[in-house]
Amino acid sequence: MESLTQFIAVVRDLLWGPWLLVLLVGTGVWLTICLRGIQFRLLGRALRLVISKDHSGPGDISHFGALMISLAATVGVGNIAGVATAVASGGPGAVVWMWVTALFGMATKYAEAFLAVRFREVNCSGEISGGPMYYLKNGMNTPRLAWAFAFFGALAAFGIGNMVQANTTSAAINSVTGLSPVTIGLTLSALTWLVVVGGVKRIAKVVILLVPFMVAIYFIGSMVIILRHWTEIPAGLVLLFKSAFTGQAAVGGFAGATVAQAISFGVARGLFSNESGLGSAPIAAAAAKTNQPGTQALVSMTGTFIDTLVVCSLTGLVLAVTGVWQSGETGVHLTQLAFAQGLGSAGETLITFAVVVFAFSTILGWGYYGEKCFEYLTRQRWVMGYRYAWVVFVYVGAVMKIELVWNLSDAMNALMAVPNLIGLLVLSGLVARETKVFESDMFKKNSSP
């Protein structure tokens, strides 16, 4: 088993090498040019659309519900442990490169959601189905690429969206309460079943409650720490930008990092966190009630903004102003140390609670993604069986060591991204043309008396 784990790790590292990171960011840069910087020009309008009451058109859930499912799958352990890992390995400057990645990733997220709504279908149950597999099939006429995306997506979901999250939740609860992984796994599985059995509408109802609440709690806790260290804010910001472009010398327990390491870890963790280009978020976007692909695309674009430019930034600033990034710790333990220093024992409790809620919401969001990929592969057969399997694997993830699952799911995520990025690049002209028409109609409507 150890040799298999090492082999999968080598494959993962090859797949997530510089070539894929360049392709992911490069696609974002290209789409930013094609869409004339839409993420900068229309961000304000996009944020207003998030809370809009206009839900006319076919679909299963509201704009806000689609965004919350997307955020449920992306705002998670990566925002807490992923940022800390990037800072611990690449220095504080990695946060700046996460910002850069997110700014271009917003254009990618717009294009993904636009195409998902543009080429979505109604399945035999009367529900909306969409995502990369449908715009690869209907937009590019490449059913083999569509099948490949769905296959890798269905497999990746059981890893990064299920067992990894269940394992993280189990470890966090066990460390605080001493409850056995078996008890935690059974409870988590039961809660998961109660939600996923109701399909996308019930998932949306639950994550609409969970995600805004947890983001608000995390925001408040982070801001309290940052404001308590308000005299360190200027120095903290200088540290972020200086180390982004000059590297960071060894200090305390920190081993030092070059500019290349800051870029590498910042870009990689930024992409892992917001999933721009991965192809997962447009599966939820396709279910939104809308007649205009551009409307939901703008709403989906805000997901990357909230995930990386807000939540990840809070983590990065807390690590910088408290100075714990020099401690030599990494991952969730580093973030726990920062919050414990800033809020005492309440800070450590807050991080544990955040990990549990974020991980559970990720299980729900990825449960929908995986189900839709599975539905595409099987032509909507055995969907209920998939839901049963999803619940079983939540329990398995909670009670077993899953290093192999981490490596395998990372590899599947990379293999998801490749066909999706091909589709985005090939269909970028269509997105640009139809977005111009959408913007023209939108501004005419707003200017009419």
Image (cartoon, rainbow, N blue to C red):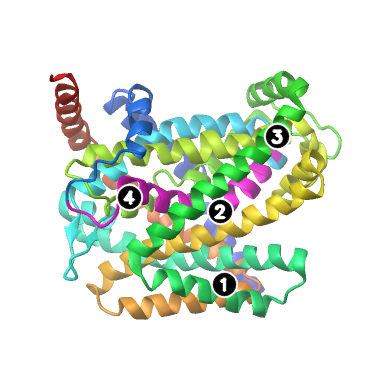
Q: Identify the residue at horizontal 47%, vertical 54% (top origin).
A: 209
Residue under label 4, please give it: 282
Task: Report, in whole angstroms, how far the alpha carbon at label 2 lies from the one at label 3.
Answer: 38 Å
From the image, state whether disc 3 or disc 1 is nearer to you. 3
Q: Which residues are magenta?
A: 58-87
Q: Identify the residue at horizontal 36%, vertical 70% (top origin).
A: 198
Task: Report, in whole angstroms, how far the alpha carbon at label 2 lies from the one at label 1.
Answer: 31 Å
Look at the numbered disc 4 and give the secondary structure of its residue: helix
Q: Amino acid at mark 4?
A: Pro
Give the mark, 2 or 1, whose residue is nearer the N terminus.
2
Residue under label 3, please give it: 224
From the image, state whether disc 2 or disc 1 is nearer to you. 1
Rendered view: 292 above or below 395: above
Give the mark, 1 or 4, whose residue is nearer the N terminus.
1
Task: Report, in whole angstroms, how far the alpha carbon at label 4 lies from the one at label 2.
Answer: 26 Å
Q: Identify the residue at horizontal 56%, vertical 42% (top origin).
A: 216
Instruction: Sort mark 4 into few (<14), some (14-19) or many (20+) by Cα contacts within 10 Å.
Output: many
From the image, state whether disc 4 or disc 3 is nearer to you. 3
Name the residue nearer the viewer: 161 or 223.
223
Q: Amino acid at mark 2?
A: Asp
Coordinates of residue 323 in the picture (x, y in percent): 79, 33
Look at the numbered disc 1 and give the secondary structure of its residue: helix
Give the mark, 4 or 3, whose residue is nearer the N terminus.
3
Residue under label 1, please give it: 188
Name the residue nearer the viewer: 62 or 5.
62
Rendered view: 262 above or below 62: above
The quarter of the rendered structure image containing the C terminus is top left
